[in-house]
Amino acid sequence: AVFALHRHRPNAPRTATVVVQPERTVELEASMSVQPIALPAIEVSVRSRTLEQNGFYERADAGRGTQFSLLDLQRSSPVVLSDALRGRVPGVTVEQDASLATRLVSRRGDGVGQGPCAMPVFIDGVPGMAEDGALFPVEAIEAVEVYQGLEVPVQYGGNECGVVFIWTRTN
């Protein structure tokens, strides 16, 4: 006896027994209809190794600060970071000083005179000039984090004014 096994549906095998007599030939034809099987939707997310290693996702998952991916930043077709953040982070404004230097400024105060203060900028984890952040080209950015007051991660100092992290694209 010969056993033929085929699967009609996933995990539902069907068997048929065909008896073949010695010295005889039996022709066997099997056909299967092609019916698509609906699978549940899957979501694929790709995370940046640089952002993962520098704690970006961990801080975002903890709900601290305000994070922007490159796609978030590009929604308004900005050229520089200050254009992308303008009006999108409560308490943060874009200002120019007397020398026309553009800075991201926190309205939450500096903890001393409680006046507005220029937010320190870190580029790929390295301290930069406040002016560097406001005019940073969006096309070179992978992600941005903005923290104010007590939200500032401890490893970046307890600056009451806040900080801006710019993570650059590596490719």
Image (tube, grey):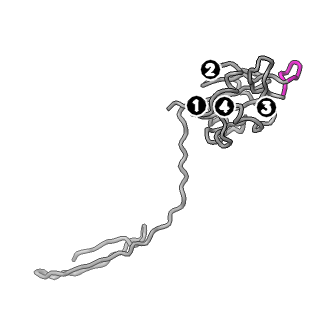
Image point (60%, 32%), residue name: 141
Query: In the rendered image, which residue does mark 1 sit on?
Result: 140
Q: Residue 166 placed where, x, y %?
A: 64, 28
What distance separates the C-alpha of mark 3 from that of mark 1?
Answer: 22 Å
**What's the mark number on residue 92?**
3
Stretch in magenta: 108-115
Q: Can residue 155 be seen in this view?
A: no
Circle 2 is placed at which residue position?
126
1 or 142: nearer the viewer: 142
Q: Which amino acid does label 4 sit on?
A: Val
Q: Earlier in the sequence, mark 2 or mark 1?
A: 2
Image quadrant in which you'd find residue 59 = top right
- Spatial CA distance of label 2 from label 1 is 16 Å
Say which residue label 4 marks.
80
Element assignment for label 2 = strand
Q: Which mark is in front, 4 or 3?
A: 4
Q: What element carries label 4?
A: loop
Determine the secondary structure under disc 1.
Answer: helix
Label 2 to label 4, Cα distance in Å? 19 Å
